[in-house]
Image (cartoon, rainbow, N blue to C red):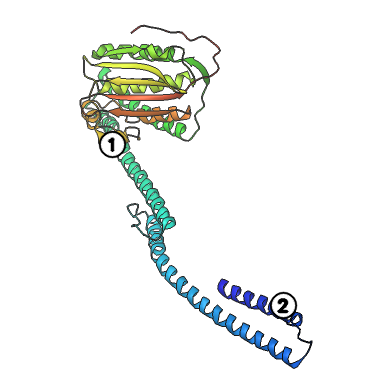
């Protein structure tokens, strides 16, 4: 339709503009008005112009049609491929991918974006399935324990004594803690978490976290060191309670994976416009294939599952959500199994200092 419209427009302009101009030049060359010779010349010019223009437009239309047909065939296959892939993706087949279409930069870019989206959806679906499986696993143990005690009490086999009360209270507390953890991480990720933000000295945050976890570290025989050398003068605008929760989760995770006699170091430093709070241990370490998943809900490595069932597998997820809510970031690094791990929290520095920070040089 575009080509036909262009051809008709060209013919109309040529018929309206060409003859008057040609007639004017004939008069200027000495021909008289309305002579048979002048009429014949103008008629010949008009016919020659129409024939030439018509043939040229016809050839152009045929060539354009051929090019259009070629490009249409070239584009149809990749578009049909992407349409089919999108249809499969909408049916829940998240492993669907678009092959290299090779039909130009734009379509190749579209195919790459589609594949990236499909990979993200597949990863989200895998996380959802694993989360549901792990959640069912987390609930199964306390529910089975409560059910067994309920049957025992009903049949008169068990009595409500101090030991039974302790077991029932522990399992009930475990269920309540799991429910609270799920609600908290959901609130943080959905932006429903209220923050009471004030400037705080980084060194104060480190020592507060140290004091809160000192007793369990002493009981297990793990050394907890605080290095405030790089935190002198640093302040961050944070919710002190929430950041204390983040550090407590990281220190608890480090304690769980560090054997007696090991060392966990809590340190801070400045990195550009951010303060970095680091929890470093020389414990179990993290395999390379697990580093990308440590902040996912209910994700735990094998060592955590076999050695300690007290964790819900959601503490690191809560920590990441809380740090994100403060406009920061959290990362995990490790040189491999048996070589320890390092978790680093990045928080924006407070630029307007209202109070002088307290610097503590203890270790």
**In the image, 62: left or right of 128?**
right
- In the picture, the disc for residue 123 is none
**SS at badge 1:** helix
Residue 291 location, quadrant = top left
Could you give the CA–CA distance between mark 1 and mark 2, rounded to whole angstroms?
91 Å
List x then y, in percent, for residue 335: 24, 28
**SS at badge 2:** helix
Tell me which numbered mark, 1 or 2, is placed earlier along the sequence. Answer: 2
Q: From the viewer's side, name the closer residue of 344 and 314.
A: 344
Residue at 21% of width from left, 19% of height from top?
A: 259
For the N terminus, which image quadrant? bottom right
List x then y, in percent, for residue 73: 41, 69
Residue beneath label 1, please? 137
List x then y, in percent, for residue 218: 27, 11
For the C terminus, which image quadrant? top left
Disc 1 and disc 2 in contact, CB within 8 angstroms:
no
Residue 187 appears in the figure = yes
Q: Is residue 360 above or below residue 172?
A: above
Task: Check disc 1: other Cα within 10 Å, few if <14, some if 14-19, many if 20+.
Answer: few
List x then y, in percent, for residue 313: 32, 31
Q: Residue furthest right?
A: 33
Residue beneath label 2, please? 21
Q: From the viewer's side, name the closer residue of 110 and 8.
A: 8
Task: Check disc 2: other Cα within 10 Å, few if <14, some if 14-19, many if 20+.
Answer: few
Residue 160 appears in the figure = no
* Tally of numbered tags: 2
**In the image, 92: left or right of 303?**
right
Q: Is residue 359 above or below residue 75?
A: above
Residue 48 location, quadrant = bottom right
**In the image, 257: left or right of 92?**
left
């Amino acid at each position: 339709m575009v080509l036909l419209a262009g051809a008709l427009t060209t013919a109309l302009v040529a018929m309206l503009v060409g003859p008057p101009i040609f007639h004017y030049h004939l008069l200027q060359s000495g021909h008289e008005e309305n002579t048979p010779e002048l009429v014949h010349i103008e008629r010949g010019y008009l016919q020659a112009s129409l024939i030439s223009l018509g043939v040229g437009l016809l050839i152009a239309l045929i060539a354009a049609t051929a090019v259009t047909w070629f490009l249409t065939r070239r584009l149809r296959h990749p578009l049909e491929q992407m349409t089919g892939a999108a249809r499969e993706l909408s049916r829940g087949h998240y492993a669907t991918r678009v092959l290299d279409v090779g039909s130009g930069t734009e379509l190749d870019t579209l195919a790459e974006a589609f594949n990236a989206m499909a990979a993200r959806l597949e990863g989200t679906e895998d996380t959802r399935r694993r989360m549901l499986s792990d959640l069912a696993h987390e609930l199964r143990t306390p529910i089975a324990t409560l059910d067994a005690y309920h049957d025992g009490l009903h049949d008169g086999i068990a009595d409500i004594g101090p030991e039974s009360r302790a077991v029932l209270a522990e399992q009930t507390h475990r269920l309540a803690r799991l429910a609270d953890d799920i609600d908290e991480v959901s609130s943080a990720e959905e932006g429903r978490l209220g923050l009471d933000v004030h400037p705080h000295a980084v060194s104060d945050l480190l020592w507060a976290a140290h004091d809160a976890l000192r007793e369990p570290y002493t009981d297990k025989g793990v050394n907890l060191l605080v290095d405030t050398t790089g935190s002198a003068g640093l302040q961050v605008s944070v919710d002190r309670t929430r950041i204390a929760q983040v550090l407590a989760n990281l220190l608890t995770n480090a304690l769980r994976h560090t054997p007696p006699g090991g060392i966990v170091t809590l340190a801070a430093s400045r990195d550009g416009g951010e303060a970095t709070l680091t929890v470093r241990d020389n414990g179990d370490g993290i395999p390379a294939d697990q580093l990308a998943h440590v902040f996912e809900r209910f994700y735990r490595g094998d060592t955590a599952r076999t050695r300690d069932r007290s964790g819900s597998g959601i503490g690191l997820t809560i920590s990441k959500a809380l740090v994100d809510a403060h406009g920061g970031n959290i990362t995990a690094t490790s040189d491999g199994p048996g070589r320890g791990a390092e978790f680093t929290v990045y928080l924006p520095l407070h630029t307007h200092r209202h109070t002088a920070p307290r610097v503590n040089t203890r270790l």
